[in-house]
């Protein structure tokens, strides 16, 4: 059963990792996918082709969600290319980890801009379309770090916690027009980025998780499918931890 048949989705930061996993699972469920990437045109073209082979419309856009004008432009282009926008997944994000005593102002500002300001930019740009349609599902990718904090990640934790406050406010503002806003807080998800870490360290993390494994991009993507589909029609303003029980 294809839960997103005929729906049009935008996913930011989708050329690798969690974003790519979401794009693939959405396409398998019948969604047409517009996605953004920041640098790797080659990876984006490859993903575009993969998604189209699943029988859906797919297009990659080089766009920086942290730039207000680029976000506006992106929504205009996707609207023209796809006709409507039913789902927005704000997934673009970066880290610049350091203890506060060593963190530069630039590293703080950049993480807030890319992770949090991008959610403001994209939501503001897409809301006109969704308000007109009188439906939409916005899914914001936070982190367990945004829920509980983490030493050495004050900038990242602040950006991801801010995303939760913003999302709850949007749930209240946009709910009367049948636009839902929810948050996913992933735990330790194994992607190509974590593949570069020391195996012993990763094993230690896995052991500390009640389900005894790291998550996969598919674990996050499946939760996104639920929140994007009509199965979650009465759910808004919620934070779903997808973390194998880390925060239990």
Image (cartoon, helix red, strand yellow):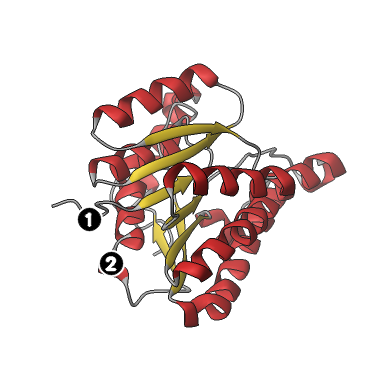
The tag earlier along the polypeptide, 2 or 1, is 1
Labelled disc at residue 3: 1
Q: Position of residue 184 (x, y in %)?
A: 44, 58
Q: Position of residue 77 (x, y in %)?
A: 56, 42
The answer to whether 173 appears left or right of 135 in the picture is right
How many numbered discs sit on the rendered protein?
2
Q: Which residue is mark 2?
A: 230
* Rendered residue at 59%/59% (across/down): 123
Residue at position x 44%, y 21% from top?
Answer: 45
Q: Nearer the viewer, residue 30 or 145?
A: 30
Label 1 sits on a secondary structure element that is: loop
Side of 222 where 23 appears, left or right? right
Residue neighbourhood size for the residue with mark 2, other residues' Cα within 10 Å, grouped as few (<14), some (14–19), many (≥20): few
Q: Position of residue 143 (x, y in %)?
A: 52, 53
Q: Is residue 70 left or right of residue 134?
A: right
In the picture, residue 18 is in which quadrant? top left
Q: Residue furthest right?
A: 105
Residue 242 locus on image (x, y percent): 38, 55
Q: Write the residue at 42% across / 32% down.
A: 191
Tag 2 near tag 1, CB within 8 Å: yes
């Amino acid at each position: 059963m294809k839960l997103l048949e005929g729906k049009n989705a935008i996913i930011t930061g989708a050329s690798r990792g969690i974003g790519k996993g979401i794009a693939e699972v959405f396409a398998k469920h019948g969604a047409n996918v517009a996605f953004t990437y920041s640098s790797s045109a080659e990876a984006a073209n490859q993903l575009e082709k993969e998604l189209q082979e699943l029988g859906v419309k797919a297009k990659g856009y080089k766009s920086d969600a942290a730039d207000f004008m680029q976000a506006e432009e992106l929504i205009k282009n996707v609207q023209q290319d796809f006709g409507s926008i039913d789902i927005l997944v704000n997934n673009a994000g970066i880290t610049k980890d350091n203890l506060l005593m060593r963190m530069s102002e630039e590293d703080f500002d950049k993480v807030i801009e890319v992770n949090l300001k991008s959610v403001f930019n994209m939501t503001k740009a897409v809301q006109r379309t969704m308000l007109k349609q009188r439906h939409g599902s916005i899914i914001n990718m936070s982190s367990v770090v945004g829920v509980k904090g983490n030493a050495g990640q004050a900038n990242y934790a602040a950006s991801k916690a801010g995303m939760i406050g913003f999302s709850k406010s949007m749930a209240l503002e946009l709910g009367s027009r049948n636009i839902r806003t929810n948050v996913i807080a992933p735990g330790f998800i194994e992607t190509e980025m974590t593949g570069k870490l020391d195996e012993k360290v990763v094993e230690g993390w896995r052991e500390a998780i009640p389900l005894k494994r790291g998550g996969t991009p598919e674990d996050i993507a499946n939760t996104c499918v639920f929140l994007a589909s009509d199965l979650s029609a009465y759910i808004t303003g919620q934070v779903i931890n997808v973390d194998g029980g880390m925060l239990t």
